[in-house]
Image: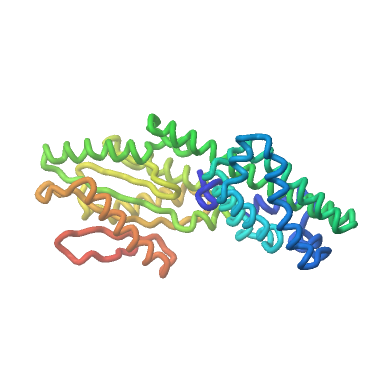
Amino acid sequence: MIQSNGLFEFGQIELNERIEMLSLSSETHHQWKSKLSQSEEKLLRDNIYPALLSHFDQSDTLSLVVGHFAVHQAMEQYFDILFNQNLNQDYIDSMTKHALKLANHGVTLSLYSIIAFEFKRLIVNQFSAIVHCEKAIDLLNRRMQLDMMLVIDCLHHKELEDIKRYASLMDVKDSLTDLYTYNTFVDEMDRIIAHCQRTQSSALLLKVNIKDLSDINATHGYDAGNEILRAFAHSTQELIRKSDLLARGEDDNFFLIMPETCNNEAKLICERIIEDFEQHSELPATLRFGASSFDPKKRTSVEQMLFLANEHLDFARDRSKITDKHEVSVHFSNENNIIRLIK
Protein backbone atom coordinates (compact mmCIF):
# COMPACT_ATOMS: atom_id res chain seq x y z
CA MET A 1 0.00 0.00 0.00
CA ILE A 2 2.81 2.29 -0.81
CA GLN A 3 1.89 5.53 -2.49
CA SER A 4 3.95 8.68 -2.31
CA ASN A 5 7.06 8.16 -4.48
CA GLY A 6 6.65 4.49 -3.87
CA LEU A 7 7.53 4.97 -0.22
CA PHE A 8 4.45 5.38 1.94
CA GLU A 9 0.84 6.50 2.09
CA PHE A 10 0.67 10.25 2.59
CA GLY A 11 -1.10 12.98 0.68
CA GLN A 12 -2.38 16.54 1.00
CA ILE A 13 -5.21 15.52 3.32
CA GLU A 14 -2.79 13.88 5.76
CA LEU A 15 -0.38 16.81 5.45
CA ASN A 16 -3.12 19.32 6.27
CA GLU A 17 -3.93 17.36 9.43
CA ARG A 18 -0.28 17.56 10.53
CA ILE A 19 -0.05 21.27 9.72
CA GLU A 20 -3.16 21.99 11.76
CA MET A 21 -1.91 19.85 14.65
CA LEU A 22 1.32 21.90 14.81
CA SER A 23 -0.56 25.23 14.44
CA LEU A 24 1.18 25.97 11.15
CA SER A 25 -0.24 27.19 7.87
CA SER A 26 0.85 27.68 4.28
CA GLU A 27 1.18 31.39 5.05
CA THR A 28 3.09 31.21 8.35
CA HIS A 29 5.48 28.26 8.05
CA HIS A 30 8.16 30.41 6.32
CA GLN A 31 7.84 33.59 8.38
CA TRP A 32 10.91 32.72 10.46
CA LYS A 33 13.02 32.89 7.28
CA SER A 34 12.36 36.62 6.87
CA LYS A 35 14.45 37.24 9.99
CA LEU A 36 17.62 36.04 8.21
CA SER A 37 19.68 37.95 5.70
CA GLN A 38 21.17 36.00 2.77
CA SER A 39 24.61 36.04 4.38
CA GLU A 40 23.18 34.77 7.69
CA GLU A 41 21.29 32.03 5.88
CA LYS A 42 24.49 30.93 4.14
CA LEU A 43 26.40 31.02 7.41
CA LEU A 44 23.79 28.83 9.06
CA ARG A 45 23.89 26.31 6.20
CA ASP A 46 27.69 26.19 6.18
CA ASN A 47 28.12 25.72 9.93
CA ILE A 48 25.61 22.97 10.66
CA TYR A 49 27.19 19.99 8.93
CA PRO A 50 30.71 20.43 10.43
CA ALA A 51 29.09 20.85 13.86
CA LEU A 52 27.10 17.66 13.33
CA LEU A 53 30.22 15.71 12.35
CA SER A 54 32.03 17.04 15.39
CA HIS A 55 29.20 16.04 17.72
CA PHE A 56 29.27 12.41 16.56
CA ASP A 57 33.01 11.99 16.10
CA GLN A 58 33.21 9.70 19.17
CA SER A 59 30.71 7.23 17.71
CA ASP A 60 32.12 5.07 14.91
CA THR A 61 28.68 4.05 13.63
CA LEU A 62 27.11 7.51 13.62
CA SER A 63 30.28 9.20 12.38
CA LEU A 64 30.45 6.78 9.45
CA VAL A 65 26.80 7.36 8.52
CA VAL A 66 26.86 11.14 8.90
CA GLY A 67 30.20 11.38 7.08
CA HIS A 68 28.90 9.61 3.97
CA PHE A 69 28.86 12.00 0.99
CA ALA A 70 25.32 11.00 -0.01
CA VAL A 71 24.03 11.73 3.50
CA HIS A 72 25.77 15.12 3.43
CA GLN A 73 24.18 15.77 0.04
CA ALA A 74 20.76 14.75 1.39
CA MET A 75 21.15 17.24 4.24
CA GLU A 76 22.02 20.00 1.77
CA GLN A 77 18.89 19.12 -0.21
CA TYR A 78 16.90 19.27 3.01
CA PHE A 79 18.03 22.87 3.57
CA ASP A 80 16.58 23.73 0.15
CA ILE A 81 13.28 22.16 1.20
CA LEU A 82 13.30 23.90 4.57
CA PHE A 83 14.08 27.36 3.17
CA ASN A 84 12.20 27.27 -0.14
CA GLN A 85 9.51 24.58 -0.35
CA ASN A 86 5.84 25.41 0.08
CA LEU A 87 3.71 22.93 2.04
CA ASN A 88 2.04 21.11 -0.85
CA GLN A 89 2.35 17.86 -2.79
CA ASP A 90 5.80 18.90 -4.03
CA TYR A 91 6.87 19.21 -0.40
CA ILE A 92 5.63 15.67 0.31
CA ASP A 93 7.46 14.33 -2.74
CA SER A 94 10.66 16.16 -1.83
CA MET A 95 10.60 14.92 1.76
CA THR A 96 9.94 11.33 0.74
CA LYS A 97 12.83 11.49 -1.73
CA HIS A 98 14.97 12.90 1.07
CA ALA A 99 13.95 10.04 3.38
CA LEU A 100 14.53 7.42 0.69
CA LYS A 101 18.01 8.78 -0.02
CA LEU A 102 18.85 8.56 3.67
CA ALA A 103 17.48 5.02 3.90
CA ASN A 104 19.43 3.88 0.85
CA HIS A 105 22.66 4.97 2.53
CA GLY A 106 22.28 3.25 5.86
CA VAL A 107 20.20 5.72 7.86
CA THR A 108 17.72 3.52 9.71
CA LEU A 109 14.77 4.82 11.71
CA SER A 110 16.67 4.47 14.99
CA LEU A 111 19.77 6.23 13.62
CA TYR A 112 17.69 9.03 12.10
CA SER A 113 15.95 9.66 15.43
CA ILE A 114 19.35 10.32 17.01
CA ILE A 115 20.86 12.29 14.13
CA ALA A 116 17.76 14.39 13.40
CA PHE A 117 17.34 15.45 17.03
CA GLU A 118 20.90 16.82 17.11
CA PHE A 119 20.56 18.29 13.59
CA LYS A 120 17.41 20.16 14.65
CA ARG A 121 19.00 21.32 17.92
CA LEU A 122 22.02 22.74 16.09
CA ILE A 123 19.89 24.62 13.56
CA VAL A 124 17.53 26.08 16.16
CA ASN A 125 20.42 27.07 18.43
CA GLN A 126 22.32 28.81 15.65
CA PHE A 127 19.14 30.52 14.45
CA SER A 128 18.48 31.69 18.03
CA ALA A 129 21.98 33.17 18.23
CA ILE A 130 21.28 35.22 15.09
CA VAL A 131 17.59 36.02 15.57
CA HIS A 132 16.44 37.14 19.01
CA CYS A 133 12.74 36.57 18.44
CA GLU A 134 10.92 33.88 20.42
CA LYS A 135 8.02 33.72 17.97
CA ALA A 136 10.31 33.10 14.97
CA ILE A 137 12.32 30.50 16.92
CA ASP A 138 9.13 28.68 17.91
CA LEU A 139 7.89 28.77 14.32
CA LEU A 140 11.14 27.27 12.98
CA ASN A 141 11.01 24.64 15.72
CA ARG A 142 7.49 23.59 14.74
CA ARG A 143 8.29 23.57 11.03
CA MET A 144 11.29 21.28 11.60
CA GLN A 145 9.14 19.10 13.84
CA LEU A 146 6.74 18.66 10.90
CA ASP A 147 9.66 17.68 8.63
CA MET A 148 11.01 15.18 11.16
CA MET A 149 7.58 13.59 11.65
CA LEU A 150 7.24 13.10 7.91
CA VAL A 151 10.69 11.53 7.51
CA ILE A 152 10.13 9.27 10.54
CA ASP A 153 6.86 8.08 9.00
CA CYS A 154 8.63 7.43 5.69
CA LEU A 155 11.48 5.48 7.27
CA HIS A 156 9.08 3.51 9.45
CA HIS A 157 7.00 2.52 6.46
CA LYS A 158 10.13 1.77 4.42
CA GLU A 159 11.33 -0.66 7.10
CA LEU A 160 7.89 -2.29 7.27
CA GLU A 161 7.79 -2.64 3.49
CA ASP A 162 11.27 -4.18 3.48
CA ILE A 163 10.07 -6.74 6.01
CA LYS A 164 6.93 -7.41 3.99
CA ARG A 165 8.94 -7.71 0.78
CA TYR A 166 11.20 -10.26 2.41
CA ALA A 167 8.25 -12.15 3.85
CA SER A 168 6.42 -12.08 0.50
CA LEU A 169 8.98 -14.50 -0.87
CA MET A 170 7.11 -17.08 1.21
CA ASP A 171 3.72 -15.38 1.17
CA VAL A 172 1.05 -16.15 -1.41
CA LYS A 173 -1.67 -13.65 -0.42
CA ASP A 174 -1.92 -9.85 -0.61
CA SER A 175 -2.78 -8.45 2.84
CA LEU A 176 -5.12 -5.71 1.57
CA THR A 177 -7.29 -7.64 -0.91
CA ASP A 178 -6.68 -11.26 0.18
CA LEU A 179 -5.94 -12.09 -3.46
CA TYR A 180 -2.94 -14.05 -4.65
CA THR A 181 0.27 -12.07 -5.08
CA TYR A 182 1.75 -11.52 -8.54
CA ASN A 183 4.57 -14.05 -7.99
CA THR A 184 2.05 -16.70 -7.01
CA PHE A 185 -0.11 -15.75 -9.98
CA VAL A 186 2.75 -16.26 -12.46
CA ASP A 187 3.51 -19.68 -10.96
CA GLU A 188 -0.15 -20.69 -11.20
CA MET A 189 -0.42 -19.24 -14.71
CA ASP A 190 2.43 -21.54 -15.78
CA ARG A 191 0.43 -24.47 -14.46
CA ILE A 192 -2.80 -23.34 -16.16
CA ILE A 193 -1.11 -22.80 -19.55
CA ALA A 194 0.60 -26.20 -19.28
CA HIS A 195 -2.84 -27.73 -18.76
CA CYS A 196 -4.19 -25.82 -21.77
CA GLN A 197 -1.36 -27.17 -23.90
CA ARG A 198 -2.17 -30.73 -22.87
CA THR A 199 -5.90 -30.32 -23.47
CA GLN A 200 -5.53 -28.11 -26.55
CA SER A 201 -7.77 -25.47 -24.97
CA SER A 202 -7.60 -21.67 -24.83
CA ALA A 203 -7.14 -19.23 -21.96
CA LEU A 204 -7.76 -15.51 -21.60
CA LEU A 205 -5.46 -13.17 -19.67
CA LEU A 206 -6.62 -9.75 -18.45
CA LYS A 207 -4.44 -7.08 -16.90
CA VAL A 208 -6.62 -4.47 -15.21
CA ASN A 209 -5.68 -0.98 -14.06
CA ILE A 210 -7.66 1.52 -11.97
CA LYS A 211 -7.28 4.98 -13.47
CA ASP A 212 -5.93 7.87 -11.38
CA LEU A 213 -5.95 6.03 -8.07
CA SER A 214 -3.32 8.48 -6.82
CA ASP A 215 -5.73 11.37 -7.49
CA ILE A 216 -8.45 9.55 -5.55
CA ASN A 217 -6.03 9.10 -2.67
CA ALA A 218 -5.13 12.80 -2.77
CA THR A 219 -8.76 13.93 -2.88
CA HIS A 220 -10.46 11.45 -0.56
CA GLY A 221 -7.59 9.93 1.46
CA TYR A 222 -5.83 6.60 1.21
CA ASP A 223 -8.56 4.68 3.03
CA ALA A 224 -10.86 5.53 0.13
CA GLY A 225 -8.29 4.35 -2.42
CA ASN A 226 -7.78 1.10 -0.52
CA GLU A 227 -11.53 0.60 -0.37
CA ILE A 228 -11.71 0.85 -4.18
CA LEU A 229 -9.01 -1.82 -4.48
CA ARG A 230 -10.91 -4.06 -2.07
CA ALA A 231 -14.20 -3.41 -3.89
CA PHE A 232 -12.71 -4.46 -7.22
CA ALA A 233 -11.13 -7.56 -5.69
CA HIS A 234 -14.36 -8.59 -3.95
CA SER A 235 -16.75 -7.90 -6.83
CA THR A 236 -14.56 -9.62 -9.43
CA GLN A 237 -13.84 -12.61 -7.19
CA GLU A 238 -17.60 -13.08 -6.72
CA LEU A 239 -18.17 -12.90 -10.46
CA ILE A 240 -15.55 -15.32 -11.84
CA ARG A 241 -15.50 -19.13 -11.84
CA LYS A 242 -13.59 -21.33 -9.39
CA SER A 243 -11.26 -22.35 -12.20
CA ASP A 244 -10.31 -18.69 -12.87
CA LEU A 245 -7.48 -17.01 -10.97
CA LEU A 246 -7.47 -13.37 -9.85
CA ALA A 247 -4.36 -11.72 -8.34
CA ARG A 248 -3.16 -8.30 -7.31
CA GLY A 249 -0.12 -6.87 -9.06
CA GLU A 250 1.81 -3.76 -8.07
CA ASP A 251 -0.15 -0.77 -6.75
CA ASP A 252 -3.37 -0.38 -8.79
CA ASN A 253 -3.03 -3.37 -11.17
CA PHE A 254 -4.80 -6.73 -11.15
CA PHE A 255 -4.35 -9.91 -13.20
CA LEU A 256 -7.01 -12.44 -14.18
CA ILE A 257 -6.48 -15.70 -16.08
CA MET A 258 -9.54 -17.60 -17.31
CA PRO A 259 -9.11 -21.13 -18.75
CA GLU A 260 -11.45 -22.35 -21.48
CA THR A 261 -11.94 -18.72 -22.58
CA CYS A 262 -10.84 -17.01 -25.80
CA ASN A 263 -10.16 -13.37 -26.69
CA ASN A 264 -13.50 -13.06 -28.50
CA GLU A 265 -15.16 -13.24 -25.09
CA ALA A 266 -13.01 -10.50 -23.53
CA LYS A 267 -15.33 -7.58 -24.26
CA LEU A 268 -18.38 -9.19 -22.66
CA ILE A 269 -16.37 -10.34 -19.62
CA CYS A 270 -14.96 -6.84 -19.08
CA GLU A 271 -18.43 -5.33 -19.32
CA ARG A 272 -19.66 -7.69 -16.60
CA ILE A 273 -16.68 -6.89 -14.38
CA ILE A 274 -17.28 -3.16 -14.82
CA GLU A 275 -21.00 -3.43 -14.09
CA ASP A 276 -20.42 -5.46 -10.93
CA PHE A 277 -17.58 -3.21 -9.77
CA GLU A 278 -19.71 -0.06 -10.15
CA GLN A 279 -22.36 -1.63 -7.91
CA HIS A 280 -19.82 -2.42 -5.18
CA SER A 281 -17.64 0.71 -5.24
CA GLU A 282 -18.86 3.74 -3.31
CA LEU A 283 -16.59 6.09 -5.31
CA PRO A 284 -16.58 6.23 -9.12
CA ALA A 285 -13.44 4.81 -10.72
CA THR A 286 -12.44 4.08 -14.30
CA LEU A 287 -11.09 0.66 -15.30
CA ARG A 288 -8.71 -0.08 -18.17
CA PHE A 289 -8.14 -3.62 -19.50
CA GLY A 290 -5.40 -5.16 -21.60
CA ALA A 291 -6.18 -8.66 -22.90
CA SER A 292 -4.24 -11.46 -24.55
CA SER A 293 -4.97 -15.15 -24.98
CA PHE A 294 -3.38 -18.56 -25.22
CA ASP A 295 -4.06 -20.26 -28.54
CA PRO A 296 -3.06 -23.96 -28.46
CA LYS A 297 -2.31 -23.84 -32.19
CA LYS A 298 0.18 -21.00 -31.72
CA ARG A 299 1.50 -22.15 -28.30
CA THR A 300 1.96 -18.62 -26.99
CA SER A 301 4.27 -18.54 -23.97
CA VAL A 302 3.38 -17.13 -20.57
CA GLU A 303 5.94 -14.36 -21.07
CA GLN A 304 4.41 -13.40 -24.43
CA MET A 305 0.91 -13.33 -22.95
CA LEU A 306 2.00 -11.06 -20.11
CA PHE A 307 3.85 -8.78 -22.54
CA LEU A 308 0.87 -8.51 -24.89
CA ALA A 309 -1.58 -7.88 -22.04
CA ASN A 310 0.63 -5.09 -20.73
CA GLU A 311 1.04 -3.62 -24.23
CA HIS A 312 -2.71 -3.55 -24.76
CA LEU A 313 -3.29 -2.10 -21.31
CA ASP A 314 -1.11 0.80 -22.45
CA PHE A 315 -3.35 1.18 -25.51
CA ALA A 316 -6.44 1.20 -23.28
CA ARG A 317 -4.84 3.76 -20.97
CA ASP A 318 -4.10 6.07 -23.89
CA ARG A 319 -7.67 5.80 -25.12
CA SER A 320 -9.08 6.32 -21.62
CA LYS A 321 -7.15 9.59 -21.27
CA ILE A 322 -9.17 10.87 -24.24
CA THR A 323 -12.58 9.41 -23.43
CA ASP A 324 -12.38 9.37 -19.62
CA LYS A 325 -14.34 6.10 -19.80
CA HIS A 326 -13.72 2.41 -19.18
CA GLU A 327 -11.63 0.96 -21.99
CA VAL A 328 -10.36 -2.43 -23.13
CA SER A 329 -7.83 -3.36 -25.77
CA VAL A 330 -7.64 -7.00 -26.91
CA HIS A 331 -4.82 -8.66 -28.82
CA PHE A 332 -5.98 -10.49 -31.97
CA SER A 333 -3.03 -12.10 -33.74
CA ASN A 334 -4.69 -12.29 -37.16
CA GLU A 335 -6.52 -8.98 -37.11
CA ASN A 336 -5.84 -5.32 -36.63
CA ASN A 337 -5.69 -4.76 -32.88
CA ILE A 338 -8.08 -1.99 -32.02
CA ILE A 339 -9.11 -0.12 -28.90
CA ARG A 340 -12.58 -1.23 -27.95
CA LEU A 341 -14.66 1.28 -26.01
CA ILE A 342 -16.49 -0.40 -23.13
CA LYS A 343 -18.58 2.28 -21.53
Residue drawn at the location 44% of the way across and 50% of the way down: 252
| Residue 41 point in image, percent of width and height | 76, 62
Q: Is residue 309 above or below residue 192?
A: below
Q: Nearer the viewer, residue 274 or 85?
A: 85
Q: Is residue 30 above or below residue 229?
A: below
Q: Quadrant of the C terminus?
A: bottom left
| Residue 134 point in image, percent of width and height | 89, 53
| Residue 42 point in image, percent of width and height | 73, 63
Q: Is residue 160 above or below residue 145?
A: above
Q: Is residue 122 left or right of residue 335?
A: right
| Residue 270 point in image, percent of width and height | 33, 53
Residue drawn at the location 68% of the way across and 35% of the way down: 58
Q: Residue furthest top?
A: 170
Q: In the rendered image, is residue 219 in sight? A: no
Q: In the rendered image, is residue 215 in sight? A: yes
Q: Is residue 122 left or right of residue 166?
A: right
Q: Is residue 100 left or right of residue 328?
A: right
Q: Is residue 309 left or right of residue 126?
A: left
- Which of the 4 image quarters holds residue 248? top left
- Which of the 4 image quarters holds residue 64? top right
Q: Nearer the viewer, residue 84 or 4?
A: 84
- Which of the 4 image quarters holds residue 236? top left
Residue drawn at the location 84% of the way across and 51% of the way down: 138
